[in-house]
Amino acid sequence: MTSTGTDQLANGGRQLDLLSVVAPVYNEEGTIEEFYSRVRAALEGLNFELVLVDDGSTDSSATILERLAESDPRVRLVYLSRNFGHQTALTAGLDHARGDAVVMLDADLQDPPELIPRMLDHWREGCDVVYAVRERREGESRFKLSTAKWFYKLFDKLAQVELEHNSGDYRLLDRRPLDALLAMRERNRFLRGMTVWVGYTQAAVSYQRDPRYAGETKYTISKMLKFSLDAISSFSHRPLQLATLLGFLISTLAFIAIPVVVILRLSGSYLPGFGSITIAILLLGGIQLIAIGIIGEYVGRIYDEVKGRPLYLVRGTRNVRQAEGSISAERGDAGTEPPLVERKT
Ligand code: UDP
Ligand code: MG
């Protein structure tokens, strides 16, 4: 491994044998075909595979995907057994990608595939991670933009990796950082943070983020909240330390209050302090509960990891193991292409 790495550095230019483009698909019946043709047009002349992960779609996405895979063997499909969420679906796709370089992007055409050749140029010059930075974000609600801004500010303050504020998951990875990323099997995944964490040489290309081609965002407010919580808790212990800090602060206040009360009592100016006592009790109780809650978040995550469940389950694949020919997954004939239940830990 090391020797190829140094060779690559010495030689400069890299040769691309196969490019993998990975996208998660969740109820995107209105976009898939357009997405496919734009990727195909953008990668004209390149040897590529398009790995599409069906994240348990309930609309006609699966049928459309099936049709695409039928007509183009470069389209490889992975069907998850249910909806596992964006980041996990993306991981499933990355697991199945076989390229020397892998691009991950959303299937809703908010990330224009036309950017890929520019990313590849950087990769050829020796960059290992090329991430796309959005210059403008079109067609997104003010709510989404402002929550995103606050989230990145908070993440900056708390987390131990430096994240480019306007970069999403749209990025290209060389095989080495990709393997490193895939070796990280943690359950609460914040991929864009993890790709920065792995290091190697990183570069940015800028682009304008388009509005969604069709359909609606699949990120509900609760999914967004969970996502930001995952992001912060997987890259920072600060919230836990915050609890300790608050505890110390409040206890100090209490200690200061003791002589004050004694002096007031001695000087005779005694006020029946039911109100203030109640407030103090409530305040302390609240802070304790918050602290316990923060600890609970982490304990919950430890529990998740300790259980060691697979990250996702694959219901079937298509065009993934080409040598054996392509057989439909749904029929579930064991021993043929579709590994019916592929456990990924
Ligand atoms: N997605 C997914 N599983 C989910 C939610 C979303 O695979 O549970 C996919 C979705 O099909 C799209 C990408 O993740 O390709 C990004 O989702 P979306 O565009 O809804 O998010 P937004 O751009 O609004 O943040
Ligand atoms: Mg989107």
Image (spheres, grey):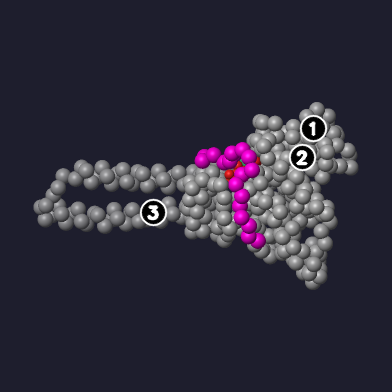
Q: Tag 2: Cα neighbours inside 10 Å, few (<14), some, or many (≥20)? A: many
The numbered dot on residue 329 is 1
The numbered dot on residue 74 is none
Whole-number angstrom distance, CA of label 1 to CA of label 3? 54 Å
Mark closer to the observer (3, 2): 2
In x, y percent, where is residue 133?
61, 58
The numbered dot on residue 246 is 3
Would you say 73 lies left or right of 302 here?
A: right
Where is 6 relative to 17, above or below?
below
Residue extending furthest left?
268
Q: Secondary structure at mark 1?
A: loop
Q: Is residue 237 magenta?
A: no
Q: Tag 1: Cα neighbours inside 10 Å, few (<14), some, or many (≥20)? A: many
Q: Is residue 220 magenta?
A: yes
The amino acid type of the residue labelled 3 equals: Leu
Discs 1, 2 touching: Cβ within 8 Å: yes
Provide the major secondary structure of the magenta segment: loop
In x, y percent, where is residue 255?
28, 55
